[in-house]
Amino acid sequence: MKFKLIYPKWAKLDRQTEFHLPPHGPVVFAATLPEYVDVDFVDENLETIDFDDPVDMVGISMMLTVQVKRGWEIADLYRRKGIKVIFGGIATMLHAEETMEHADSVFLGEAEGRMEQVLADFRQGKLQPRYDFMDTRPDIALVGPARRDLLNRQLYNYKGVQMVDLVHASRGCRFNCYPCAVSFLGGREFRPRPIDTVVAEMAGIANNRMFLVDNSLAQNSQWEKDLFREMIPLKKKWCSHPIEDKPEILDLAAQAGAWYVYQAVFDTSDYIRERVKRYHDHGIGVEGTILLGLDNHDEDFIKRLIDFLLEIELDLAEFTVLTPFPHTKAWKELNQQNRILSQDWNDYSADKVVFQPKQMSPERLQELLDLAWNSFYREESQELKMFKLFKQVVEKEMADGTFTPRDRSLANQAFGRDASR
């Protein structure tokens, strides 16, 4: 059986550096397919879909809301050819009802242990329009290594430099943040994978650099410590969403190869200032993720926040505006207050204002988003800050002997500087 798995193209943030990470969801899903399925994966961000290639079934994996309209277009083209299309992924779960209008089937939830039945239904001509497992999650121990063999490795680099491979050590999140849909998607129960399984998958990744894409590693102190201890011998270098900033945990994270973390910066408090400092004291970089447009944000607050970001010496910063994705607290509240201005999903890229802010006009919030980007990168460009952060990982790799002459050559080509100096 030939199964074409497609990851629809989507527009990156205006200010993001143009490099692409290998998508995680599709290759995790592909690992759930039976051995008799011949999978052809196409990342439309980097490859062209051959609509004339003969296939038995098409799967469309959508992570982001800004992918859904393109995903629907792709499905419509295949269905006009008489080819069955099934959708899955985060954005499918967020937009299930609309997606069903363009699909022969939608799969909602986690796929481990469930695709045999779906494909049996397909072969018997009994494919169901909806497979809904949102409330019945599989045993987390069933999660196997992602099918990274499906990826065209040459496409996922920055000017020849291999950046990071994606891997996850847990699912679910005990937090329930205002702008986030994770509690709807994965539940509020923290579900760690067996550590030996996770470490084995990491060890099997040829790339020395990884991104742990877990929603947050800061969910169970003992688990963090156990995980980091087991990662130390791998000599991998990795970035992640927040980890706990307790001294023992930070020390183990640094020994395990922590390169940098994504840290939400939501105010100008000493708590944030000290947290960033503790990361830095342990040799861990910080990329601030800054969300603008919450109801307590007036113009003065946003300007003070921008100044604060420069004071605390973030290594990088990414600015977005509040975006009310379906099934979030933000969506429910703003929708009830009739403050959502657009439901064109192509606008839900997190860099366009699609709602009425409480303390300013939408146009002014858009201007302040531009001001934030311009101000933070005024003295040092985004490329220079990226180079400095990359230099940190090079220094770590040189210290443990995993940085090769070929790495040095590629790094020099990519950044126009000697990253090893």
Image: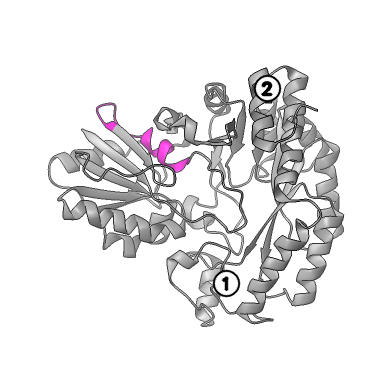
- Amino acid type, residue under disc 1 in the picture: Val
Residue assigned mark 1? 353
Please identify the quarter of the rendering in which residue 129 is found.
bottom left
Give the position of the C terminus as an image quadrant: top right
Element type at mark 2? loop
Residue 271 can be seen, yes or no:
no
Of 417 and 43, which appears nearest the observer?
417
**Image marks 1 and 2: residues in contact by CB distance under 8 Å:** no
What residue range appears in magenta? 23-38
Magenta stretch contains residue 33: yes
Residue holding disc 2: 235
Query: Can residue 326 be found in the magenta stretch?
Result: no
Residue 12, compared with residue 392, is above or below; it is below
Which label sits in the foreground, 1 or 2? 1
Q: Picture coordinates of residue 200 (x, y %)?
A: 54, 22
Residue occupying the point 58% across, 36% down: 159
